[in-house]
Amino acid sequence: QVHLVESGGGLVQPGGSLRLSCAPSGFVFDVRTMGWYRQAPGKERELVATITAGGAADYADSVKGRSTISRDKDKYTITLQMNSLKSEDTAVYYCYADAFTQDYEWGYRELWGQGTLVTVSS
């Protein structure tokens, strides 16, 4: 089965920056929208940023202006650059992809990464 592999999480100082990356681990025929969501302990998962196959990006208000999501369509890889990190950014970040795969049958399905922890603390 196709999995999304995430990288880049870790401990970051307030005001610092990080870069999260995500890519499929297996064969993917096509990918529509990809993005990043995050979930803090005791809270619901929320959108951080998404990017369509055409490159149109959308950001949550809380990260707008200090975050940039980019996409490598050929490699189905997305990168989230976050700057001026705050303690409020602490959460488990999950990669998302609407992907066309051959898992059991051909078709589009939601893929989620296992999550990578981002901790913003001094």
Image (spheres, rainbow, N blue to C red):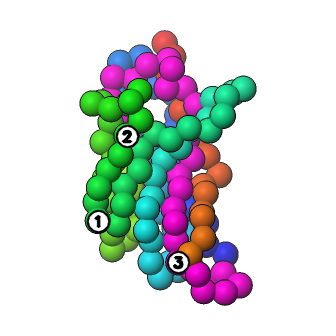
In the rendered view, tell whether residue 17 sits above or below residue 88.
below
Q: Distance between the residues labelled 3 and 2?
A: 24 Å
Of the pair 47 and 93, the residue shown nearer to us: 47
The total of numbered circles placed on residues is 3
In the rendered view, tell whether residue 20 sits above or below residue 32.
above
Q: How far apart are marks 3 and 1 (CA)?
A: 16 Å
Callout 1 touching callout 2 (CB < 8 Å): no
Q: What residue type is labelled 1?
A: Gly
* Among the two numbered marks 1 and 2 on one chain, the one whose residue lies closer to the N terminus: 1
Q: Distance between the residues labelled 1 and 2?
A: 16 Å
Q: What element carries label 1?
A: loop
Which quadrant does the N terminus fall into? bottom right
Quadrant housing residue 105: bottom right
Instruction: For label 1, count other residues whose C-alpha is less than 10 Å away and answer few (under 14), some (14-19) or many (20+).
Output: few
Q: Is mark 3 on a helix, strand or loop?
A: strand
Answer whether residue 103 is magenta in the image.
yes
Quadrant housing residue 117: top right
Instruction: For label 3, count other residues whose C-alpha is less than 10 Å away and answer few (under 14), some (14-19) or many (20+).
Output: many
Q: Which residue is drawn at 60% across and 63% down?
A: 111
What residue is disc 1 on? 54
Query: Is any atom of residue 23 visible in this view?
Result: yes
Q: What element carries label 2?
A: strand
In the rendered view, tell whether residue 55 sits above or below residue 85.
below
Q: Which residue is drawn at 61% across and 57% down?
A: 112
What residue is disc 2 on? 59
Q: Which stretch is magenta?
A: 80-107
What residue is disc 3 on? 100
Answer whether residue 48 is magenta in the image.
no
Q: Which amino acid does label 3 sit on?
A: Phe
Of the pair 87 and 47, the residue shown nearer to us: 47
Judge left or right: residue 90 versus residue 55. right
